Amino acid sequence: MSRLKPLHPEEMAPAQRRYYDTIMNRPNNRHLPEGTPLTGPFHAWQRSPDFAEKLNDWTRYLREAGLLELRLMELVAITVGRVWSAEVVFAAHGPAAVAAGIDSDIVEAIRRSETPEFEKADEAAVYHFIHLLMTTHEVDDGTYQAALDELGEPALVELIGLAGLYATASMTLNAFRIPVRPGMERPYPDKM
């Protein structure tokens, strides 16, 4: 159960409402009924709309002008989401990863906390780099070099920033115990 009560539009301060409108106007939310409270990390971030807008700018840059392909961005999301056992991240980005071109067997292996087998060198480099960084807080020379060879320095910087964004989202979800949206399948049903 979430530690935060839902915020309805009529209860929001003007800055919260502007943030709400920004999130609700995203393509994946346009089908929701008017007045639906925000879910996911947005539910928490809305409490600090200035902070939320900065995160929005960061996300917008990475998604619209960044150097990483969507396929690799979604791989980062599910890798970080799984390390943090953040159900909302994986529930939202698991299907998005498959839609972006990540093999469903890879997504399922990550969901089960198993090391996936990759056919694509860039996916292997990204997964191993991010998983190692998230779990050990450092990256050995071989893993670093593989990621550098696949991505180059500028994209490697963005890769680390993207992982930080999803770590922020995952920590927010876990700290506030924000559940998956009604109708979404829980990816780790054994998680409390």
Image: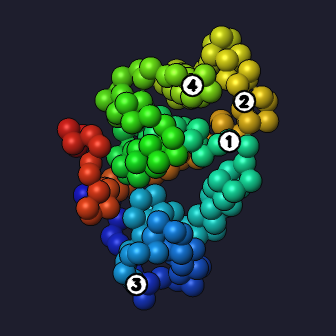
Q: Residues within 10 Å of mark 4 (few under 14, many from 20)?
A: few
User: Which amino acid, mark 2?
Assistant: Leu
- Whether residue 171 appears in this view of the structure is no
* Amino acid beneath label 1: Leu
Q: Nearer the viewer, mark 3 or mark 2?
A: 2
Question: Which residue is label 2 attached to?
Answer: 151
Q: Which residue is drawn at 67% across and 17% down?
A: 146
Residue assigned mark 4: 120
The quarter of the displayed image where residue 33 is located: bottom left
**x then y, percent, for residue 99:** 47, 48
> On screen, 171 above or below 39?
above
- Element type at mark 1: loop
Q: How far apart are marks 1 and 3 (CA)?
A: 33 Å
Question: Horizontal and vertical percent for residue 15?
Answer: 59, 79
Residue 41 location, x and y as percent?
46, 58
Pick out the residue farthest to the bottom. 10
**Residue occupying the point 66% across, 37% down:** 159
Q: Earlier in the sequence, mark 1 or mark 4?
A: 1
Along the horizontal axis of the image, is 116 left or right of 126?
Answer: left
Res 162 seen here:
yes
Reply above or below: 181 against 73: below
User: How far separated are the C-alphas under marks 4 and 3?
Assistant: 42 Å
Circle 4: element type: loop
Picture disc at residue 68: 1
Q: Label 3 amino acid?
A: Glu
Disc with the residue nearer the chain's start (2 vs 1): 1
